[in-house]
Image (spheres, rainbow, N blue to C red):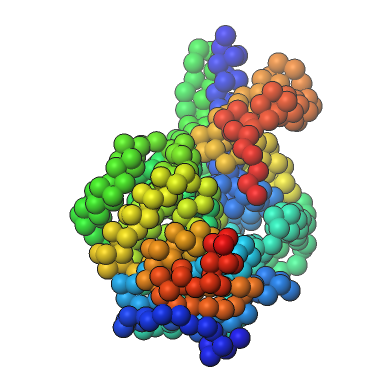
Amino acid sequence: MAQLLQHLINGLASGTIYALVALGYTMVYGVLKLINFAHGDVMMVGVYMGYATAFALGREARASLLGVAVVFAVAMLGCALFGFLIERFAYRPLREKPRLTALITAIGISFALSYGFQLDIGFLPGASPRAFPEIITPTEWLIIGDRDVVVWNWQVISLLIAVGLMVGLQYLVFGTRFGRAMRAVSWDHRVAALMGIPTDRVIALTFMLSSALAAGAGLLYAIKDTSVSPLMGLYVGLKAFVAAVIGGIGHVPGAVVGALVLGLVEEFVVGYAASTWRDAVAFGFLILVLLVKPGGLFGRVAAEKV
Amino acid sequence: MSEAQVKTLGERRAFEPLLTVDGIKVHYGAIQALRGVSLTVGKGEMVALIGANGAGKTSTLRAVSGMLKASAGRITFSGQDTTALKAHQLVPRGMAHAPEGRGIFPNLSVLENLELGAYLRKDTAQVRADLEKNFGLFPVLKERRSQMAGTLSGGEQQMLAIARALLSRPQLLLLDEPSLGLAPQVTETIFRTLREVNATGVSVLLVEQNAHLALNAAHYGYVLETGEVVMAGAGKALLESAEVRRAYLGE
């Protein structure tokens, strides 16, 4: 029983991190019908921004509450700017081209980032993983029984941050004027422009928002994993993409549920079977969901607009 | 074809120009959709653009509203050169375009669709009043305001498209085939409302395949053929012309 509870907590903690990244996939897909395969790598870039900031702050400053806030702020803002630049110079010129063109561009950016960051020149970090500096010192936040169940502080923090960001995002999309504009652009950006909606700006802001969320999630992941590497984006990005598809891509609460389910599935596989099975089961689960519900758990299979 | 070669019928009443389109050309890749279209819409006028499928009616509207970029020519709206402006920049200047196929957002409620029509307006109280006014014009929209717009019938969607366009408080309303796919009775309702709207001072540029309907409602009309204006004239005069009757009214 205690073991089950422990796995539930661990699974939810990693699920919330996937959720934040999955939300980025789902938002961008929502407005552009583009699967932004570079999303995980944008996250990785954000994590390195946080890494550099943490080092610049020094051992003491970065462990303070203010230090942590600075690391997150720099990474998230920097990553938002980075996401803006990618959209502006890589995707926007392809707006009226077939969707496949943008998709392949996204894959190209993904590889350019994940392999470009393995170079060891200038500010680039080189291929080997690096230890992520301790910005949140892991502490046992809650211990039940004789260490039967242990809840770590970073788990609680990442859960709170993730839930807060999700609630905020849900409100943004369904409760604000900007969200209404996003949903209009999502249906048809040409008609949305006829309403006076500056569609390019809405799309750019969506990219910035999703990149900032990714940077935040990536930092939480790096804190949990205690390391950073240029390839982390490919791995986390792929998992989060799976989560978004399980939930029904384009569906905001779906991405969150898909990510939590994926986090739990992985944790239970590791806990009750073997860790080597984790990825196989995760992707097998995706196949299973798509067999039963091709649009994902919450998605509807819509007829392709022509 | 130059302006001089356009056959003109009947008298046009004196007007102050609101929209002047001067020799615009539009290409889709290698295909030339518009070969130099010129037309004017006066303040308070209802102008019809008729012609066969593929004559360039929709392309003309799209170029005017900034959805398409004209490769040559000049568009002047409300005294300003708007040729290079994008669609979203024309809305605050008083242009509203209810596009081909109605262009409603089926994933949003009827009310949300209408609110998007007023997206740029900050005068919340006045927007509320205008919303009520539009519900007066189309009572069925009031009944269905919390329904998803995708669940409306074709006629109701057309009403929504017009009401949404009006909520931006336009000087000029561009309408693309409002009668398409609708029952004659519904079409009649829509055209009656259009005349009411026009009577309040909103200029209308109307694209229609149903030439009879359009020319009856409009003060002035233009006939497009393969990307060029071939004839122009007062609505009634065009309706009575033998050429128009033969080509577009099936006589």
- Can you give x and y, in whole percent of width and height, for residue A218 in the image? 59, 46
- Can you give x and y, in whole percent of width and height, for residue B157 in the image? 44, 46
- Whether residue A114 appears in this view of the structure is no
Residue drawn at point x = 65 percent, y = 43 percent: A304
- Can you give x and y, in whole percent of width and height, for residue A9 in the image? 55, 23
Instruction: Report the residue that reaches farthest toward the bottom.
Output: B4
Residue drawn at point x = 47 percent, y = 23 percent: A142
Give left or right: position of B40 versus B52: left
Q: Is residue A166 above or below residue B215?
A: above
Give left or right: position of A107 versus A219: right
Q: Name the image quarter holding residue A243.
A: top right
Instruction: Report the residue that reaches farthest toward the top.
Output: A1
How many numbered markers are drawn? Answer: 0
Front in this rendered view, residue B212 or B78: B212
- Can you give x and y, in whole percent of width and height, for residue A76 in the image? 52, 54
Q: Quadrant of the N terminus of chain A?
A: top right
- Whether residue A135 appears in this view of the structure is yes
Residue drawn at point x = 69 percent, y = 23 percent: A292
Give left or right: position of A306 versus A152: right
Q: Name the image quarter holding residue B213.
A: bottom left
Front in this rendered view, residue A277 or B41: B41
Q: Name the image quarter holding residue B126.
A: bottom left
Residue drawn at point x = 35 percent, y = 58 percent: B194
